[in-house]
Amino acid sequence: MNLQALIPKLEILLTRIEDLEQENKMPIHFLLPLADKVPEKAPTCLIEFLDLFKGIPELKFFHNQYQVWPSGGAQYLTYDFLAHWLIRRGSQHGPKEAVQNIEKFFSSPKIPFHQFFSIDGIQVPEQFTITPELSLIPWDSEILSTSHHKTQIDQNLLPGIHGPSAAIMREVMVPRHAIFSSNLPVPNMSDSTKDLRILAQLLGVLGQHGIRFWYSWKEFPDWVPLNGDPSPQPWIFSNKLQVAPPSPWDTKKLNEWEKLFNSLLKLSKEEQAAIEVPVERLNSSKGQSFLRDSAIDSGIALEALVIDRNQPPEDGIAKTLRQRIPAILDIRGRKKKRVVSLITNFYELRSQAVHTGKVEPKIHQKSSYEVINETHNLISELIQSCIMNGKPLYKNVEGRNICTRLTKKVTDFLRLIRNCGLLGHRP
């Protein structure tokens, strides 16, 4: 393929763009269709430029086609669309690189296709690869530097709001013709981000702060000809005020996150669904501005993890949690006493939040903030246990609870008949 003839013509054209627009009183992307459809009313240099396109057989790939955008919708393409892309690309990176991009496109049987899921609450020093397709990247990474969506997000941030600090990136290699096909590898936006959302929320399980979602979008790299929507609009997930700045993560912490995610992938859909609510509520609790809301979210997370909705506890939720959580985490002695005391304090705090709409600064001489933070750590530990064990936590103690109940019934029965004089007392 010989596209080199385009370079000198493009170099000349780039030097005349401003004059052409002023002379004809219309932007270049209006002049190009005019040169194609009504050549007698268009500048000669544009007509000659388009004639070059028509003389290169391979470029027919971009003519009389429907381009399907990653976010949905399509547009009918002709040579003038490609000419406009080449002029725009040439003005940004030079004529030679613009032509090389087209050559690269035709020499690549598969093209990288990116999906980004931007988040706040964590800072990473460099790109961290989770799987061959998934990576966690800093918000200021080179990969995102050419994204139109990132530029829009940064330009539209409101004062006092922390913008995204990182992004999860999925890269899929797609056949070249997929750019002009509705069979893109990633389906509807709402469906295709579910695994990325869970992956991001696991960061909140292990981290100091909850993870806030910003935008999700899909696009081809900027070197791909006609690579995106003319007016891209990122999809908003959440826009809550983030009180605390994002916390830095090191490689060790990221490795823990990767291990937890890989364990999650091994679970069945039902097992994964069982932790969705606790994980979401823990992230929400960590991101709340008021203790009242944080206490309510934490309570939902705890109960969703430990209480079987099909078998409501007979002795009350708080008492059941005080019995079950030490058994689930297999803790005894002083640590068990601390956990039992924490649950007692937390449920008193939660009761205040639910019934009065406010939370006292202290619970039994202990800071309410401290109680909430310790509860966050406890929920995080329970979620990790749930993922590693692969089943709801209440099932982990089900057999133990049955034995406990049988032992209690036998003990009560023996005490009863002894009191009635039917059994002799031990010497």
Image (spheres, grey):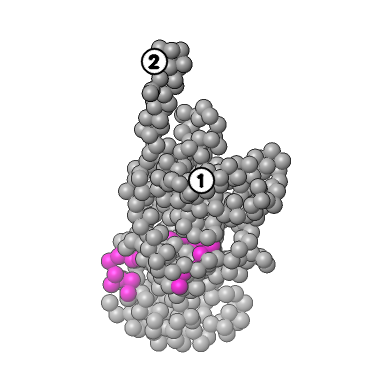
Query: Observer-nearest residue: 418 or 39?
Result: 418
Give the structural element (helix, strand or loop) at label 1.
helix
Label pair 1/2, CB-CB below 8 angstroms: no
Residue 287, image x and y in percent?
59, 55
Per the image, the residue denoted by label 2 is: 423
Where does the C terminus fall, quadrant-wise? top left
The answer to which of marks 1 and 2 sits earlier in the sequence is: 1
Cα gap from disc 1 to disc 2, whole angstroms? 36 Å
Amino acid at circle 2: Leu
Residue 160, image x and y in percent?
67, 66
Query: Observer-nearest residue: 198 or 293?
Result: 293
Query: Observer-nearest residue: 315 or 413?
Result: 413
Q: What stretch is highlighted in magenta?
A: 104-125
Per the image, the residue denoted by label 1 is: 337
The residue depicted at 33 percent of the width and 83 percent of the height is 4
The residue depicted at 45 percent of the width and 75 percent of the height is 142
Where does the N terminus fall, quadrant-wise? bottom left
Task: Tell me if I can see residue 234 in this picture.
Answer: no
The residue depicted at 54 percent of the width and 57 percent of the height is 210
Residue 107, image x and y in percent?
28, 72
Q: Of tags 1 and 2, which is closer to the observer?
A: 2
In the image, taking residue 159 as reference, residue 57 lies left or right, namely left
Task: Tell me if I can see residue 16 in this picture.
Answer: yes
Amino acid at circle 1: Lys
